[in-house]
Image (cartoon, coloured by chain):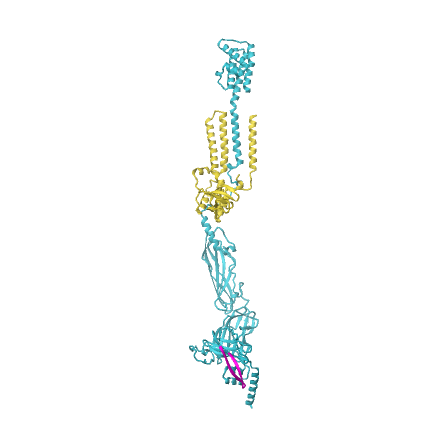
Chain colours: A cyan, B yellow
Amino acid sequence: MKALLAIALFLAVCTSAMGDAPLAYQTIEPSKIIIGETAILRITSLDSELQNVKLPEVSGLSFEVLGHSRAMEFINGTASESSSIIIRVTPQIAGIFSIPGLTPKSAPLILEVNTDRNSGNLPLTLNGKAPRPPAPPEPKTGSVAGIHFVADGSAFVQLKMPKRAVYVGESVPVDIVVGVHPGVVTALNGLPTIKGGDFTLNNLSRQPERQEEILDGKPFLTMTWHSVLAAVKPGDFSLTVETPLTVKISSRPSEDAAFANLLGGPFLQNFYNGIVPKEMTVESLPADLHVLSLPTVGRPPDFSGAVGAFKVSSDVSALKAAAGDPVTLRMHVTGAGNFDRVDSPMLEHIDHWKTYPPKSSFSAADPVGYKGEKIFEQPLIASQTGEQTIPGLSFSYFDPETRHYERAQTEPIKVAIATSLADSSLKSPAVAENADAGAARAAAANRSTAGLKADHALTRGTENSLIPLYLRPRFLVIPAALALLVAGCLIGIRRKPQHAASKAIERALAQLNAAARSGDSSTFLDTARSLLLQNLAQRWQMPPEQITTEDLAARLGSDADDIGRLFELADEAKYSGYDSNATEISRWLPIVRRQIALAGTT
Amino acid sequence: MRAANVAALVVALASFVSQSFAQEPADAAYSAAGLYNLANSYARAGKPGMAVLNYERAALLAPNDADIQANLNYVRASLHLPAQASSRVSQILRLASPTSVAWIGVLGVIILGASLLSAKLSRRFRALRLAGIILGITALSFTTCNALVQWPKIREAVVIVKETPIRVSPVPMGDALLQLTEAETVTVTAEHEDFVLVRTRTGRSGWAARADIADVVPRHTVR
């Protein structure tokens, strides 16, 4: 009875299947290959002739059209002509590939490519000509404890945490393992994520580590992601990790699947076993996590939230420097922990040094940044020569192993500071950034001016002009005026001989008057003659003894007779004893005075 | 009466001189120390052209300052420029500052004039008068020679740019005869618009851009 029901059901299913059967389908043989082999993709159309199809684009697979074929197929006793396109598929990498339908009526296909023959239950290739790779090491047989298989035992997700009690803010390295059974799980549709909002999953490694294992008697491809987990608040939590997958499952009862397996051909197997892909999200078993608060007792004032195990050391860029030259102080923090919370103000103020804000950089030693080295660099400029000591640096953190706050300390560093090469003292921060180039320029400038004499003290005396005083026209007035003054005086002094002559004439006139008053005619006439001769000689610019009677007549005119008569009487009085009376003297006196007065006016 | 006239003349001259000096422009105040310090600053700042210019200016006010001459020669030597040769006579003539030399000249005029006048007025103290005449002539000669030595200085200029071409004509496109380097000293002999005709120490002449050189004595004070 059961057999009859099965046959009836089979026929019904076949009828319904044929009624819904696509008019085009595609097959791939074999569906599991290894690297170096190829598979044949055949696209068959029952209702129309296939011309050309667009080759699919699948990363890791290459497609090549080999040719076309025609055939007669008998379906349910009815012969129909079919056309096919034969395509060769060559894989470049191992993996599970989904080849989309090449016609609108064809369903996608799955091709599993392994690195070696033992990676899965791969059948031997039909031609048997492919070189058999060397025997790989036996896959590890893992324990199934703590693994929760899903999707009919074809996949699992596992969260591995080395610790069970952590502190708030602590970075906890975790491993997320996703295992898939090749051939069943067809695609991984996303990265694993943590379930819940009280944790952060940081720095998930980009490429998982792939490994093949046999778990629960089945081959599994496991992918392991490394990450760092951090709790944001204290408490007891249950963590799960989930990841989306596409799994190939059978939609028919197991009896039908067994029957389909008896059919042998892939086409008929696909046709009858009812395997369809299904997207699903698989979760790990919940992992309990106890999160503690950081203790407040004994918390250092400079604690920045760093939790982990750290070591510190320090050094400087140069142990010998010149005053004004920048020296870089470095503090190295190495270890494992939450380096994003590792911070230090370095040195905020020290005597004889000018400090600048530090900068930090982090170099990770693992893919997730849990281990590494953080370096703080702080520029310092010494302002005093001699041996200067840079004090040790300290760094506080919480050690989850000892459950205490720890304080790491570095040793002081001695730096020999020489005299500044530059004149300038301390530099501004902006200058400090370019201090090396600036110091070099200053040193070069100083070398070129080292031989200069020192500056002078400023005096109060200033000049209005750079022109020498003796070249300024206004100053030249002074010596010019003085020269004129001297010249004027000299000219004035040169007139004095005439003045002296007039004085002599006055004296002679006085003598003449005295002789006239005494009545001494001889003295009077002699004095009058000599006085007139001197006077006339001066007027005529000639010696007195050369004056003749003709000169008197020619130059004196009407007065020549009187002057000539006076000269004759003077000779008579001198040589013959002529003695004139007082009346005659009084007649001659005005004549003589008039002539002398004439001489003075000329 | 004549003495009163002479006194009045002296008073008038003194008044004129004082008024003339009162009108002297006081827009700049120079001191040898200030110019010297400024030159040192330029030298340290790597501007030898401006350094030499200010050393030259300082030397005008204090020609007997050894530091000025030393630094001037040092800067020139550092630029591989030939040092200015200074004869013994010119060194002697520059023993005193130009201002002192000017007043020495005035004093010489006074001594010489007085000696001449006294010789006219009296025949006594002939030796003293002769000494006065010689002293006055010496003072005047000293001042005159000092002025002759310093006179070219006020026509000198210094190149204050790295290099400037000397052209055959006072136009920007004129052919360049040679290149003058910074801190070289030239003598300005003529001007034309934005160019000055300069003569180098080697005797070559050409036109240089006015902006590339600076007068030792600023132009507005040269009259």
Q: Nearer the viewer, residue A475 or A158?
A: A475
Q: Where residue A435 sits: x, y (%)?
A: 49, 55
The residue depicted at 45 percent of the width and 50 percent of the height is A447
Q: Which of A208 and A183 is in front in this view?
A: A183
* On screen, residue A108 above or below B25: below
Q: Where residue A456 sits: x, y (%)?
A: 49, 44
Q: Where residue B206 sits: x, y (%)?
A: 48, 43
As for residue A83 lying within the magenta part, the answer is: yes
Q: Which of B73 and A182 is in front in this view?
A: A182
Majority secondary structure of magenta residues: strand
Which residue range is magenta in the image?
A67-84
Q: Where residue A334 sits: x, y (%)?
A: 48, 65
The residue depicted at 55 percent of the width and 36 percent of the height is B21
The residue depicted at 53 percent of the width and 18 percent of the height is A505
Q: Which of A307 and B45 is in front in this view?
A: B45
* On screen, residue B26 above or below A596: below
Q: For residue A25, say whether it is visible.
A: yes
Quadrant in which the N terminus of chain B appears:
top right
Q: For residue A323, say whether it is visible.
A: no
As for residue A413 lying within the magenta part, the answer is: no
In the current view of this chain or complex, which residue is farthest to the bottom? A1
* On screen, residue A546 above or below B10: above
The image shows a total of numbered marks equal to: 0
